[in-house]
Image (cartoon, rainbow, N blue to C red):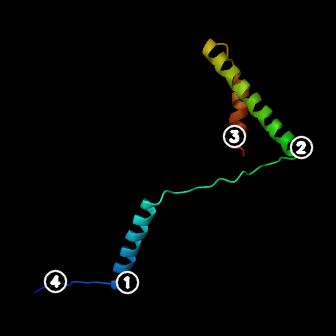
Amino acid sequence: MSIDRVSISNTAIDRALQSNEIAEARTAEQPRQTSVANDEINLSSAARDAERLANLAEQSRADHLEAVRQAISNGTYNVSGEDIAKKLIDLNTR
């Protein structure tokens, strides 16, 4: 059995590769110019209120978590067994 070497050439692929190289060379020669439009966003009063409430809720949650962290580190965080049992039951009945 003999396998001869085969040279496969596709002129369309070769031309595409060459044109891509030319385009890359042109792009490298020319500095890129970008323009930034001066866009402006105006929020309604309802959107501003919703954002403010979301920030307050997040801050309240962060404050609560920090208080729990402090209590745990101080050794003053206590949870009753009844509360733990209720949470476990709630989690398993959903």
What residue does disc 2 label? 45
Q: Which mark sits nearer the N-terminus, 3 or 4?
A: 4
Q: Are marks 2 and 4 in contact (CB under 8 Å)?
A: no
Q: Are marks 3 and 4 in contact (CB under 8 Å)?
A: no
Q: Position of residue 33 (x, y in %)?
A: 55, 56
Looking at the image, residue 81 lies above or below residue 41: above
Q: In the image, which disc is placed on residue 5?
A: 4
- The residue indicated by pointer 3 is 91
Within 10 angstroms of label 1, few (less than 14), some, or many (20 or more) residues? few
Q: Which mark is nearer the camera, 4 or 1? A: 1
Three-letter amino acid code at the position of disc 3: Leu
Q: Nearer the viewer, mark 3 or mark 1?
A: 1
Mark 2: amino acid: Ser
Dot 2 falls on a residue whose secondary structure is: helix
| Residue extending farthest front | 30
User: Residue 78: image x %, image y %?
Assistant: 69, 18
In the depicted structure, whether residue 4 falls above or below residue 92: below
Residue drawn at (63%, 12%), measured in percent from left and top?
74
Q: Which of 13 and 80 lies nearest the eye of the viewer?
A: 13
Rounded to the nearest angstrom, the CA distance separating label 2 from label 4 is: 75 Å
> Can you tell which quarter of the image residue 22 is in?
bottom left
